[in-house]
Image: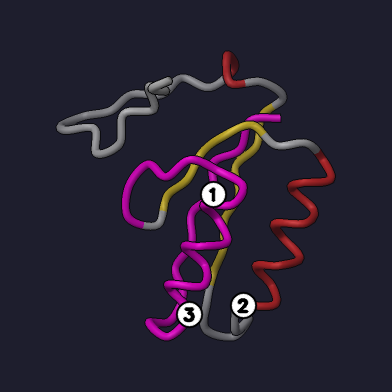
Amino acid sequence: MYVIAVYDVGEKRVVKMLKLCRQYLNWIQNSVFEGELTEVQLKELKYKAKEIMKAEEDSFIIFSSREQKWMDKQVIGKEKNNLDNFL
């Protein structure tokens, strides 16, 4: 499934959340990530994110779709991370 993840966490937890999301998804900008995940990978990501977060202060939002082709992505202004893969 195609996933867009956005987080807003306390300053002390930002680096941990950034590293976690980079393990599973592609960085787009600041605290926004996207990519393809399996159901199991998404469950792992949610579980690990909950371990980092303080539920009463932080948020982690996940948008998901069966496939990327069902998402209409528009970038207005400069795209901060081009997802082209270099070999």
Q: Between marks 2 and 1, how big is the CA–CA gap?
A: 15 Å
What's the residue at 32%, 55% (across, down)? 30
Asked if residue 8 lies in the magenta stretch, the reply is yes
Q: Secondary structure at mark 2?
A: helix
> Which numbered dot is residue 52?
2
| Apparent side of residue 54 relative to residue 78 in the rendered image (left or right) | right
Q: Which amino acid type is shown beneath numbered disc 1?
A: Ala
- Classify 45 as above or below 12: above
Image quadrant holding the N terminus, namely top right
User: As drawn, which residue projects farthest toward the left?
Assistant: 77
User: As drawn, which residue projects farthest toward the right?
Assistant: 40
In-front residue for pair 52/8: 52
- Classify 66 as above or below 57: above
Q: Secondary structure at mark 3?
A: helix
Q: Which residue is mark 1?
A: 5
In the picture, residue 78 is in which quadrant? Answer: top left
Instruction: Magenta stretch: give its range.
Output: 1-30
In the picture, residue 45 is in which quadrant? Answer: bottom right
Earlier-in-chain disc, 2 versus 1: 1
Give how far across and how far down residue 80 sits, in percent.
24, 39
